[in-house]
């Protein structure tokens, strides 16, 4: 089986390369917007005539290039990719409409803006791209060799494509997609209950495991969040559109970037640590929509951060053969006593500690939830003491994936 992995590095183009890079970014954005505009117009004009609408032949990339000579200055592969991207955006929109999209719902394709993150993709053709780990430089189509900064010294597999991007803070990145033959990973056989961990997602501490441990994450983010608040306050005091306003805006974007990087790094390390320490990790399935509605937090950064962590964890688990057991979100993990299985219907969202009326066990909310999730996992793995817990699970998804 073929696997894909990306390697993203920050690149430092010289003045000439920067100009060419910006040109391709601009052309990619322009052709995407023109193709989208064409589709919207054709739809508006023919929406009552299905036959004409479905039979319509849209302009190819080559036709656009003939019409707009300046597009030829861009990396041609990048322009071809924009059509793929647009069709992809449409298909995501339609599957969302039908309720068939796996991930979050997406809306109608939007025009690309210059101010947001811009990117283009290029496929490998005749050795037009490469990465030289010794000299710390990458070769990109139409740009030649560019220095990069990164610690990694090798990557497995063959390069298939590269995505070049410019962040809102004006930094340039090259993300290479490597294809490699997947090693056969043997799923870990779980025989030791000590090697099974249950994690309950918690707002303040990211998660609490079945022993009450939390990852040391909060302090760092809190510090960055203070920086962010400061930068945002400064921005709000500047006159919109002024030189100082742009400077302050850039400052805010930089702090956002630092936070995102710190989170990604944290997620990676945490996933690696959990997969090396444990044979099975039991977590809840997430419903971001339901959760943000219930807690009335809007789309909090935390929710997204946790979802990102879960996908990292699954990826690392697939590579290491670790079992990830996801317990359905409707399983009342905080209301059940992890000692006897009694369901405390009266438990409110704000009750942190409670005593089980049935067995008298002193329970801390998050730790108890982690224990319950772990108990489900242990039962499924055949390591638990026989209990009624499993009967109470509505359904289980993604067992072992
Ligand atoms: Zn109890």
Image (spheres, helix red, strand yellow):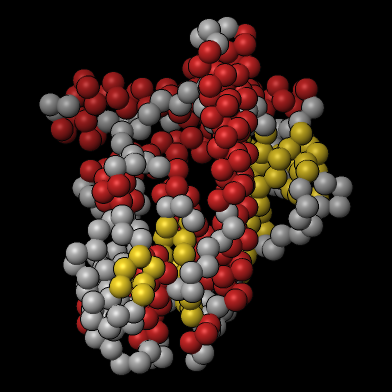
Q: In the shown orientation, is residue 104 left or right of residue 74?
A: left
> Residue sitting at 70 percent across and 21 percent down?
19
| In this view, 169 is above or below 370 | above
| In this view, 277 is above or below 222 | below
| In this view, 396 is above or below 140 | below
Image quadrant in which the C terminus is located: bottom left
Residue 264 visible somewhere in the drawing: no
- Observer-nearest residue: 113 or 257? 257
> Residue sitting at 80 percent across and 39 percent down?
147
Q: Which residue reaches farthest right? A: 135
> Residue sitting at 55 percent across and 11 percent down?
238
- Observer-nearest residue: 151 or 219? 219
- Observer-nearest residue: 316 or 98? 316
| In this view, 205 is above or below 168 | below
Q: In the shown orientation, is residue 130 left or right of residue 111?
A: right
> Residue sitting at 57 percent across and 70 percent down?
274
Residue 368 falls in image quadrant: bottom left
């Amino acid at each position: 089986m073929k696997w894909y992995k990306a390697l993203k590095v920050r690149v430092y183009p010289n003045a000439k390369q920067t100009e060419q890079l910006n040109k391709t970014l601009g052309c990619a954005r322009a052709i995407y917007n023109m193709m989208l505009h064409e589709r919207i117009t054709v739809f508006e004009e023919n929406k009552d005539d299905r036959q004409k609408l479905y039979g319509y032949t849209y302009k190819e990339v080559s036709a656009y290039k003939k019409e707009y000579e300046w597009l030829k200055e861009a990396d041609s592969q990048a322009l071809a990719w924009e059509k793929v991207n647009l069709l992809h955006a449409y298909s995501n929109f339609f599957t969302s409409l039908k309720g068939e999209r796996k991930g979050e719902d997406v809306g109608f394709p939007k025009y690309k803006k210059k101010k947001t993150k811009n990117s283009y993709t290029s496929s490998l053709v005749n050795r037009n791209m490469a990465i030289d780990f010794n000299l710390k430089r990458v070769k990109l189509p139409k740009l030649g060799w560019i220095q990069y900064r990164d610690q990694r010294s090798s990557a497995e597999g063959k390069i298939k494509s590269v995505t070049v991007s410019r962040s809102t803070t004006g930094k340039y990145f090259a993300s290479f997609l490597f294809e490699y033959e997947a090693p056969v990973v043997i799923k870990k056989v779980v025989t030791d209950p000590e090697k099974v961990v249950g994690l309950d997602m918690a707002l303040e501490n990211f998660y609490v495991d079945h022993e009450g441990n939390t990852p040391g994450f909060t302090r760092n983010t809190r510090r960055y969040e203070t920086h962010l608040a400061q930068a945002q306050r400064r921005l709000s005091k500047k006159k919109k559109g002024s030189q100082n306003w742009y400077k302050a805006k850039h400052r805010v974007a930089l702090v956002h970037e630092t936070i995102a990087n710190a989170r990604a790094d944290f997620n990676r390390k945490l996933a690696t640590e959990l997969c090396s320490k444990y044979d099975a990790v039991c977590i809840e399935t997430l419903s971001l929509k339901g959760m943000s509605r219930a807690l009335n937090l809007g789309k909090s950064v935390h929710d997204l951060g946790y979802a990102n962590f879960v996908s990292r964890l699954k990826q690392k688990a697939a590579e290491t053969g670790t079992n990830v057991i996801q317990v359905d979100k409707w399983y009342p993990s905080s209301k059940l006593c992890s000692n006897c299985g009694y369901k405390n219907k009266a438990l409110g969202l704000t009750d942190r500690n409670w005593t089980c009326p049935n067995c008298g066990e002193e329970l801390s909310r998050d730790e108890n939830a982690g224990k319950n999730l772990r108990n489900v996992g242990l039962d499924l793995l055949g390591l638990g003491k026989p209990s009624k817990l499993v009967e109470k699970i509505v359904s289980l998804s993604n067992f072992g994936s």
